[in-house]
Image: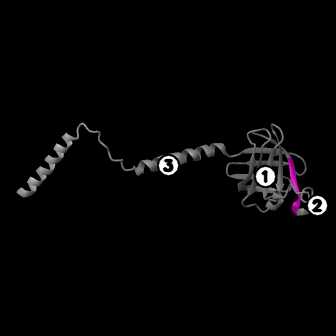
Amino acid sequence: MTVCEAESAYNTLHNHTEQGEADMGKETQHPVPAPRIGFEKWKVAALLALAATSHAMAEAPFTGAFSGTGRACSGGLFVRTRTIEWNSSFSICKPARYEVLDREGLASDQGRIAFRLKARSRRCLYEVVEAQQVSRYGWDIRGYQSLESYRKRDLPDWSNSPLGDRMILSCPMTRLE
């Protein structure tokens, strides 16, 4: 470092020190701190995790084992967290992944849920299975041969139709669990 550079550095330091002493009694303004991006990302991630947890708790998976009797309904329906299986006298639906089409009031004694089987086994007649609670342990389980049949189930021309693709199997079942 040359003498000139050293002198310049000393003067700069000395001037800042004197200026600091002169401003000592004055209110100082601090610059706005730069945003901490890492902290903000953490807050957003925490909020998303909390939202996902509360949504998952509100939408807990429906599971259950049901038993049916009678000529067409003898057998069982098994709803697991990822698969559904329905074995009856005339239709054998082996465990298959499903999607939930409708879900309402399952916390009460009159709940209803409908499942669409993603891939049916060869002897499975039903693409959509609907379970509606009618009493504490009593359920009405219905099998629809197509998604269209399920969606049009309330139309007058579709309910109780003699056409084969519109026929619905309705089985009274008892929930075992």
Q: Nearer the viewer, mark 1 or mark 2?
A: 2
Which residue occupies the foreground of this view, 91 or 118? Answer: 118
Q: Amino acid at mark 1?
A: Trp
Task: Give the residue displayed 53% in from the left and 46% down from the top.
Answer: 47
Q: Which residue is mark 1?
A: 86
User: In the rendered image, which residue does mark 2 sit on?
Assistant: 162
Instruction: Kindly report which numbered mark, 2 or 3, lies closer to the viewer in this rendering.
Output: 3
Locate residue 41, reporting x and y percent. 46, 50
Q: Position of residue 105 (x, y in %)?
A: 75, 43
Cα–Cα span, label 2 and label 3: 56 Å
Residue at the spot 81% in from the left edge and 37% down from the top edge: 136
In this picture, residue 59 sits left or right of residue 11: right
Number of other residues with Cα within 10 Å of mark 2, as a class: few under 14, some 14 to 19, many 20 or more: few
Q: Secondary structure at mark 2?
A: loop
Q: Residue at x 60, y 43 (%)?
A: 54
Q: In the picture shown, does residue 146 fall above or below 142? A: below
Q: Is residue 47 above or below residue 164?
A: above
Residue located beneath label 3 in the image: 44
Instruction: Tell me the magenta residue range.
Output: 165-171
**Alpha-carbon distance for marks 1 and 2?**
24 Å
Of pointers 1 and 3, the one earlier in the residue sequence: 3
Spot the residue most to the left: 3
Residue 44 relative to residue 83: left or right: left
